[in-house]
Image (tube, rainbow, N blue to C red):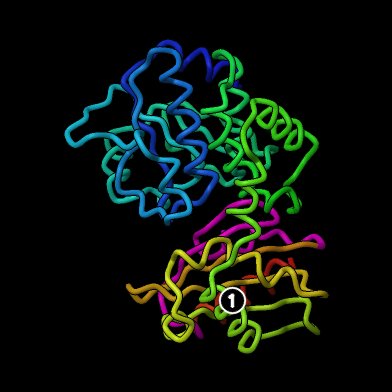
Amino acid sequence: MTYEEAAQWLRLHDRYLILTHKRPDGDTVGSAVGLCKGLRALGKTAWICPGLGETSLFTHYLEGCIAPEGYEPETVVSVDIAARGLFTQRGQVWLERGVDLAIDHHPSQEFFAKETCLDAGRGACGELVYDILTELGPVTAEMALPLYVAVSTDTGCFQYGNTTAATHRVAAALIETGIDVAALNKKHFRTKSWPRLQVERLITERMHRYDGGAVAVAPVGLSLMEEAGATEEDMEDIASFLGQIQGVETSVTIRELEDGSCKLSVRTAAGLNASAVCALLGGGGHAAAAGCTVAGTLEEAEAAIMQAIRQVQHG
């Protein structure tokens, strides 16, 4: 389904519930809020599924958009969700009942919905939501602000390899609505807490380097988090940190989780397909940025991801 077709489809339905992925980032939250407000501008009833687990960086954008208890939708739409395993606990209920439309930009999309609007060439799902909303009417500043958050955070403030000319055109159009991008950029890209700085220090001291420093792996255990005094509030986009080191072409951040598993985020350059690497461990994503979750210790997770990297490297 094209974005024009998705827009027409959205016109024909009502009473929306919008789903985002677990451990939500700026793209899924911004896309959901932008879509919610765009649908409301059409006179539709639209809410976002509660229980996101978002950090305080994104809670402000969700004000007035979280579905009230007992809300029963007629139409369920997911944004920025590529796989069944990425649904939140509450979202899983709606996945089982049936998702009506999935809007996504991941090439690893599993096509779990009845209808799918997919454009794997977009840098962020927020870009695709913007395209859809332009078909439905004028994009206001109220819609533009969360969409700018979506686009800017998923492209690392337009620094990552997924940034395209189209990304910049969308950002320019959003800025032209009058939103305060200086404040947004300061909040999301130029402010770090003291615990975050301690996390970065400890990662730098304890990371493991392979292939002459071209591959860097950062095991981030619960004990490291405790030592740094860090919480989830301090860990936004930590996966991009190692990629700032000169000579690093592939970076892996391994987060130890309370349930005994580990969440891995892989960022690559110079041709290694991160999605292919993570697919070997049940995950997915983009060619330059992907992730997966594996059972076991940090050491076991590191061994598994290095084996996957070697397998993709050697075909």
* Most foreground residue, 309 or 60: 60
The residue shown at (61%, 46%) is: 183
Horizontal and vertical percent position of residue 211 = 78, 82
- Is residue 283 part of the magenta span, yes or no? yes
Q: Is residue 298 left or right of residue 2?
A: left
Q: Residue at x 81, y 84 (%)?
A: 212
> Looking at the image, is 295 positioned above or below residue 100?
below
Give me the residue at 74% from left, 69% from top.
244
Residue 157 falls within the magenta-colored stretch: no
Magenta range is 270-299
Q: Nearer the viewer, residue 307 or 1?
A: 1
Quarter of the image that includes the N terminus: top right
Residue position for label 1 = 197
Q: Is residue 156 above or below residue 302?
A: above
In the current view of this chain or complex, which residue is farthest to the left? 70
In the image as oriented, which residue stretches furthest toward the bottom? 205
Helix, strand, or loop for circle 1?
Answer: helix
Q: Quadrant of residue 61?
A: top left
Exactly how many numbered labels are in the figure? 1
Q: Amino acid at mark 1?
A: Leu
Of the 4 image quadrants, the one containing the C terminus is bottom right
